[in-house]
Amino acid sequence: MGGEIPEYGLLRLSKVLQLIPVSKTTWWAGVRSGRFPKPVKLGPHTTCWYWQDIQPLIEKPPPRS
C-alpha cells in the first residue's frame, strides 16, 4: 500500500483511494451524494479527509450503488 496509515489525522485523496478501491469519479460522486464523508479544504489545491471519517469505510464498506 505504501506509507503508514495514521491512527488519526488527515489523508490526501491518493491515500484514501488506496484504502477505498473506487475511482476518483466514483469517490467525488459519493461525496456529493453523502455516501462518502465531506473533505476538509486546507488551501486552494489541498483537500483532505479525516482518518476518523475514512476508518469506518474500511471496516464496513458502504453498499455498492
Image (cartoon, helix red, strand yellow):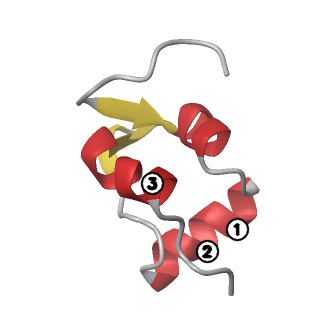
Please tell me whether mark 3 or mark 2 is closer to you in this view. Answer: 3
Given residues 41 and 23, the one toward you in this image is: 23
Q: What amino acid type is highlighted by mark number 1?
A: Thr
Instruction: Return the mark for residue 10.
Output: none
The image quadrant of residue 28 is bottom right
Give me the C-alpha separation between circle 2 and circle 1: 5 Å
| Disc 2: CA contacts within 10 A as few (<14), some (14-19) or many (>=20) | few
Vertically, is 8 above or below 53? above
Q: Secondary structure at mark 1?
A: helix
- Quarter of the picture containing the N terminus is top right
Q: Is residue 23 above or below residue 43?
A: below
Q: How many marks?
A: 3
Asked if 53 appears above or below 33 in the picture, the reply is above
Callout 2 amino acid: Ala
Residue in view at x 47 percent, y 14 percent: 4
SS at circle 3: helix
The Cα atoms of the two marked residues, 1 and 3, are separated by 19 Å
Q: Which residue occupies 32% across, 45% down?
A: 41
Q: Which mark is residue 29?
A: 2
* Foreground residue among 46 and 4: 4
Residue 59 numbered tag: 3
Q: Nearer the viewer, mark 1 or mark 3?
A: 3
Q: Which residue is rendered at x = 61% and y = 50% of the image?
A: 20
**Residue 47 appears in which quarter of the rendering?**
top left
Judge by depth and name the residue closer to the eye, 5 or 59: 59
Of the image marks 1 and 3, the number of the one nearer the N terminus: 1
Q: Secondary structure at mark 2?
A: helix
Mark earlier in primary sequence (3, 2): 2
Say if mark 2 contacts mark 1, CB within 8 Å.
Answer: yes
The residue tagged 1 is: 26
